[in-house]
């Protein structure tokens, strides 16, 4: 069974109303995957990168708008397009 907490990383202490949050998890065959997730802007330019946690989770604080998440894990690269809005968190499950 996947060790990722349902609903993504904990948001306690985060003022969601004033943030634009993109978060989620990376899994393969239902199991968390260690690797990296990149945040690319609407033109495809690199903006940020974070490692996944031991449970495959990641989080970015971004500007509102269109973004691409690129999961870079052993044996796979997967892109997911997302639209983020201030005051909300965008939950993304990436399966590789």
Image (spheres, grey):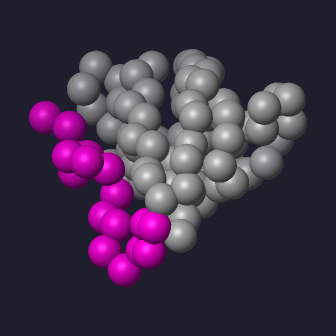
User: Above or below — where is 72 with respect to 17?
Assistant: above
21 horizontally vs 62: left or right: left
Q: Is residue 26 visible?
A: no
Q: Quadrant of the C terminus?
A: top left
Q: Is residue 66 visible?
A: yes
**Residue 59 position within the rendered picture, expressed as x and y whole percent measured from the top left:** 50, 54
Magenta stretch holds residue 63: no
Say which residue appears at 44% left-offset and 53% top-offset: 88
Which residue range is magenta in the image? 1-17
Q: What predominant SS class does the magenta segment belong to? A: loop
**Residue 11 position within the rendered picture, expressed as x and y whole percent measured from the top left:** 34, 67
Kindly give the residue lying farthest to the bottom in the view shown.
Answer: 13
Residue 78, quarter of picture: top right
88 horizontally vs 31: left or right: right
Say which residue appears at 42% left-offset and 74% top-offset: 14
Q: Quadrant of the N terminus?
A: top left
User: Above or below — where is 80 with respect to 63?
Assistant: above
Say which residue appears at 45% left-offset and 67% top-offset: 17
């Amino acid at each position: 069974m996947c060790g990722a907490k349902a609903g993504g990383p904990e948001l306690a202490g985060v003022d969601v109303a004033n943030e634009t949050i993109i978060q989620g998890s990376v899994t393969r065959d239902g199991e968390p995957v260690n690797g990296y997730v990149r945040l690319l802007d609407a033109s495809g330019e690199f903006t940020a990168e974070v490692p996944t946690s031991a449970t495959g989770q990641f989080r970015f604080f971004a500007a509102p708008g269109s973004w691409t998440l690129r999961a870079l894990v052993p044996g796979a690269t997967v892109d997911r397009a997302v639209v983020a809005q201030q005051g909300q968190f965008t939950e993304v499950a990436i399966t590789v």
